[in-house]
Amino acid sequence: MGSQMAFNLATFAQQNALPRVKIWNRTRSKIEYLAQEAHCEVVSSLEEVVDYCDIIHTCLANDEVAFSVYRQLFQAMNAGGTTFVDHSTLFPTTSKALQSEALSKGAHFLSCPVFGPPAAAKSAGLLVVVSGDSAAKETVKSYLVPTIGKAILDCGDDSSKGALMKILGNNCILGTIELLSESFTLAEKTGFDAGIFYDFIQQWFPAAAWINYGKKIRDGTFSGKTGFKLDGGMKDAAFIRRLGAETSTPTPIIDQAWNHLTTAKAIGGDGLDWSACSAGMRVTAGLAPFKGEDFSISQPAQTNGHVDAKVAHTAADVGGGVVDSHVPGNKDVAHQANGVVSEKLLNGDTPADAVP
């Protein structure tokens, strides 16, 4: 996701005769190709990003990583005026805290999560949420569309609202996946043609989430290589359930989806696309978890002293990076992709965030 966004921001810079965007990643080798293929320049530290750039885009794995990275960025600032544009999926209180810390440094923090799969990031077809300081928002809105997205949804001056919008949107998307999982499983159990049922979905629910995830569930194509991985989906589900608990709001659909995601992870590992929620539903209904490609990843597990069961186990991590770009100003503008800090920033296991 982030690398595609970075590439598009670099293209914008080049087309407008602006300096090369500055890009940074904890694992330098993961972004060196961008310097070869796009209007980018790799820098060696977050301090260099702050020195060169007055607009910095970030896309980070989780809240813990976001606090770590942003506090390094804030510490490196010698003067105010920097605008931070964060595309991560963070809990609202985290975005609000980062906005407050940025203001204390004379900077602006915008919560700008995006909706759309990697293909939409590549084609600049994302829906971009923006929230935070009005003046800073207007500056970035001037190039976000059509550079990385097709439309903008402005959620106001409070950065926590942008983060909340992302969680509410993901609630709808995961709820759709859960409903599709149930419906396709019921179709199979009753002997109904899955192809005909998918035709109905295309005709009656012609929305991207229904059509794209419906196709994956119909065909059992749950590879996470080009989609939104289970670990990210479970993080988002946890955010939804936490919001429900904190506001005394039941979230029964997401609670059930959590159970099915957990089952899918136990069987096939967290590298699957989160549409593998369907595998959990299928197991509950007495069907094989996967149809088509078998994504099971197993290793022997001891039971009563004998190796008589198999427990799925895997681990996946994906990196991110920071990319910068430039809009008119005194310094190069940082247009980040794939995360300011990539994977494994903390404790060696923090997969980068993807976007559903």
Image (cartoon, grey):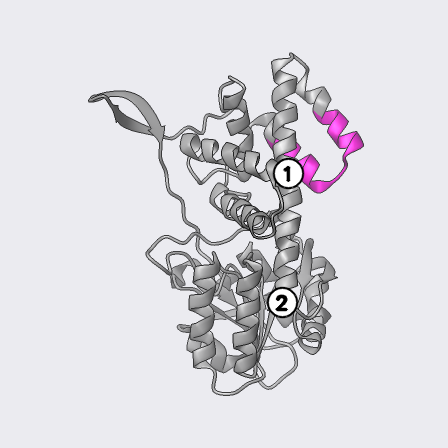
Query: Magenta stretch mostly in which secondary structure?
Result: helix
- Nearest the camera: 294 or 283? 283
Image location of residue 341, percent across then percent down: 44, 63
- The residue carrying mark 1 is 175
Which residue is at 66% across, 25% downward? 183
Image location of residue 209, percent across then percent down: 68, 40
Residue 116 in view here: no
- Mark 1: secondary structure: helix
Does residue 265 lie above or below 334 as drawn? above
Mark positioned earlier in the residue sequence (2 or 1):
2
Q: How many marks?
A: 2
Does residue 204 lie above or below 190 as drawn? below
Question: In the shown orientation, is residue 45 left or right of residue 245?
Answer: left
Could you say which quadrant of the image residue 28 lies in? bottom left
Magenta includes 203?
yes
Residue 111 is marked as none
Question: In the shown orientation, is residue 344 left or right of residue 332?
Answer: left
Instruction: Magenta stretch: give its range.
Output: 198-216
- The residue carrying mark 2 is 159
Extreme-top residue of the structure? 191
